[in-house]
Amino acid sequence: MSLSFGLQLYTVRDHMDRDAGETLKAVKAMGYDTVELAGTAGLSPAELRQLLDEYGLRAFSAHVGMDALAEDVDAEIDMAKTVGADYLVIPWLGGGTTPDRTAWEQYAKEMDVAGEAVRAAGLKLCYHNHAHEFEVVDGETIFDIIFNTAAPENLAAEIDVYWVKHAGYDPAEVIAQYADRCPIVHFKDMAATPPHTFTEVGRGIMDWPAMVDACKRAGVQWYIVEQDICPEDSLESARISAEFMATLS
C-alpha cells in the first residue's frame, strides 16, 4: 500500500500567485489529495476553501508566522478552521542571525503559549526546521532546546529531512528521536552534485527506505512533498515528485 502524501504549496507558489484555481486543479490531477498552505495566494480563507472543495483537495495544515500568532492567535485559528486545517506550523525562526540559548528558550516559551491556545481550539501547533536549528549551543542542538523547553502537548515537530541532512545529521535518526512528536514530515530531496541544492523527490541522494521506515515507526501521519526552488517549471517538479511518492510504501 502506497503512502498518503500531500504537497506544500510553497513548491508551486509562482503558479498559485497567478491562478490559484488552475494550480489546485493541476495539483489534484497529479495525484495529490492533500496540501499544506503557505499563505492564501491573495484569497480570503473562505475563497480558498471554496477552491479546495471544488477540486477535491484538503488543506490539512497551514504555515503561519510566529509574529502573526503572537499578534492575533485567534485570527490564525479561525483561518485554519475555515480552510479545514488541523495544524498550524511555524515555518522559520532565527536563521542568519541565530540568537543565543536564552533567546531560543524564549522563542520556545512563546511557541508553547501559542500552542496552548491552538490546542484549546482543537488544533495542533508545529515547528518546521531548517539547518540552523542543528547548530550546537552549550552542548545541545537548538532543535533539542526548542522541544525540551516547549511542552509536547503544545508544540510538535514538522521535520524537514533535507535541512536535517544539510546540517550533517541523519534524518531517520532525528525522526526516531522525536517519535510520537512529529506528525508531519517534509519529504524533500538533495541533488547529488555540489552545492547539493533541491531536486525532485526520488532524483537525489536521500535514503528514502530508511526515512519511510523511521516515519512509520514514529507514527508520522502526513508525508509532504516540498521543493524550495525548482530549476524549471514548478508544477512539473511537483508532478515528478508525486510519481515517485506513489511508489513508496
Image (cartoon, helix red, strand yellow):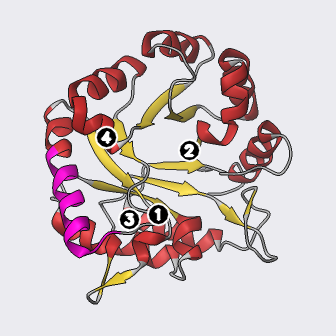
Label 1, label 2: how many angstroms apart (C-alpha)? Answer: 12 Å
| Magenta region includes residue 101 | yes
Q: Which mark is residue 86?
A: none
| Magenta region includes residue 199 | no
Q: Nearer the viewer, residue 13 or 96?
A: 96
Which residue in the structure is indicated by mark 3?
218
* Left or right relative to 17: residue 213: left
User: Quick check: can you spot residue 63?
Assistant: yes
Which residue in the structure is indicated by mark 2?
4
Under tag 1, what secondary structure?
A: helix
Q: Which of marks 4 and 2 is in front?
A: 4
Q: Residue 67 carries which label?
A: 4
Above or below for 152 versus 217 = above
Label 4, label 1: how many angstroms apart (C-alpha)? Answer: 30 Å
Label 4, label 2: how many angstroms apart (C-alpha)? Answer: 31 Å
Q: Nearer the viewer, residue 181 or 158?
A: 158
